[in-house]
Image (cartoon, rainbow, N blue to C red):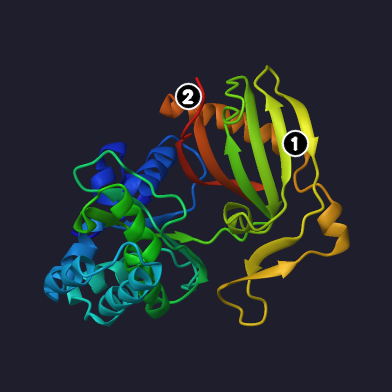
Amino acid sequence: MKFVKRIENMTADEIQETGGKAAMLGVLTRAGFNVPPGFCVTGKSLDYLIESNDLWPKIMEIVVSMNFDSYNDIESKAVKIREMIAAAPLPDDLREEIVGNIETLRDGDGNDPFVAVRSSVAVKDSEISSFPGMMDTYHFIKGEDQIVDYVRRCWASLFTDRAIYRRHQQAIPQDKGVIAPIVQRMVNADVAGVMFTANAVSGARDEIVIESNWGLGESLVSGEALVDFFIVSRTSPPQIKMKQVQEKNIMVTIDREKGIGRKKYELSEEMSKKCSLTDEQLMQLAEQGEKIEALFGVPQDIEWAFEKDELFFLQSRKIKGLKE
């Protein structure tokens, strides 16, 4: 395959091709951790689209004209770049390869499952392998045409105003960005969150910190939601040292009216006050978190989700800024 790699075939030394998120999911999958099946549309696919339509000169002309002291100027010109990518004809061989891999995700009856289209990023000729919160992710997407459309949107998010400005701040040339959309079978999460295999605030390596909320982890990652907070000791067996159950406010799940895409909902009073994780789930997360840290050799920032008591891992990366 020229443009697409299956998750189970991706390795840590392919970050420049698949982005950090996808490469680490490949490592997790081959190590036996439960990662939703799917594939990555590698970074060279966007380069191929842009080069096939001779867009680089037009994109760089817009970038050079940007006034980086004016947010409005960056925003208006970033829209023009994304519109060019959205309108550019997709080369037939690229489309055929993406569609062929979508077909492999169908169930035994040939039905299309819901998928998530998620960004995986890197910077060419650099060790940078993530830009948290800079690119776009889409949930509960279904059908070939819609998935291909959202892969395009994911590509275009490389040129959001926030992403362009972040690269400018870090003196990264705008043509060095890599985005490799991941298409994965959707986890319809009952509860999701993040786990840090060391305490990023205190620096303690003998504590695992877990935050959780009902529905998709999107509500937590975006910072919109009040969430439950736990600290678990790294003892044998693990012990729950702290349990703070918040009166939670929102959850993100499938748009119940449209039957596709995601939507934010207010929680009922009962769900808002109920602890989102059982003690058994906390123990399972802590045990798996220690194993994932051992796999990568450094403390990890992990995104996870439970669907009907089945634990899935959606991302793992090194904790940034951890105190020594």
- On the image, the x and y values in percent for residue 319 come to 48, 34
Q: Is residue 213 above or below residue 159?
A: above
- On the image, the x and y values in percent for residue 182 come to 39, 58
Q: Residue at x 37, y 50 (%)?
A: 7
Is disc 1 surrounded by few (<14), some (14 to 19) or many (20+) residues within 10 Å? few
**Which mark is first along the chain, 1 or 2?**
1
Q: Determine which quarter of the picture holds residue 271.
A: bottom right
- On the image, the x and y values in percent for residue 29 come to 43, 42
Q: Residue at x 58, y 46 (%)?
A: 304
Nearer-the-camera pick, 198 or 288:
198
Q: Residue at x 39, y 41 (%)?
A: 24
For the image, the number of numbered tags is: 2
Residue at mark 1: 280
Q: Determine which quarter of the picture holds residue 95.
A: bottom left
Per the model, the C-alpha gap separating discs 2 and 1 is: 22 Å
| Disc 1 secondary structure class | helix
Amino acid found under the numbered disc labelled 2 = Ala
User: Residue 170, can we see it?
Assistant: yes
Residue 115 appears left or right of 89: right
Quadrant location, the N terminus: bottom left
Is disc 2 surrounded by few (<14), some (14 to 19) or many (20+) residues within 10 Å? few
| Disc 2 secondary structure class | helix
Residue 9 appears left or right of 242: left
Nearer-the-camera pick, 34 or 70:
70
Labels 2 and 1 touching (C-beta < 8 A): no
Most extreme residue toward the right, as rendered?
270
Residue at mark 2: 294
Q: Residue at x 67, y 59 (%)?
A: 215
Most extreme residue toward the top, as rendered?
236
Q: Nearer the viewer, mark 2 or mark 1?
A: 2
Amino acid found under the numbered disc labelled 1 = Glu
- On the image, the x and y values in percent for residue 226 come to 72, 52
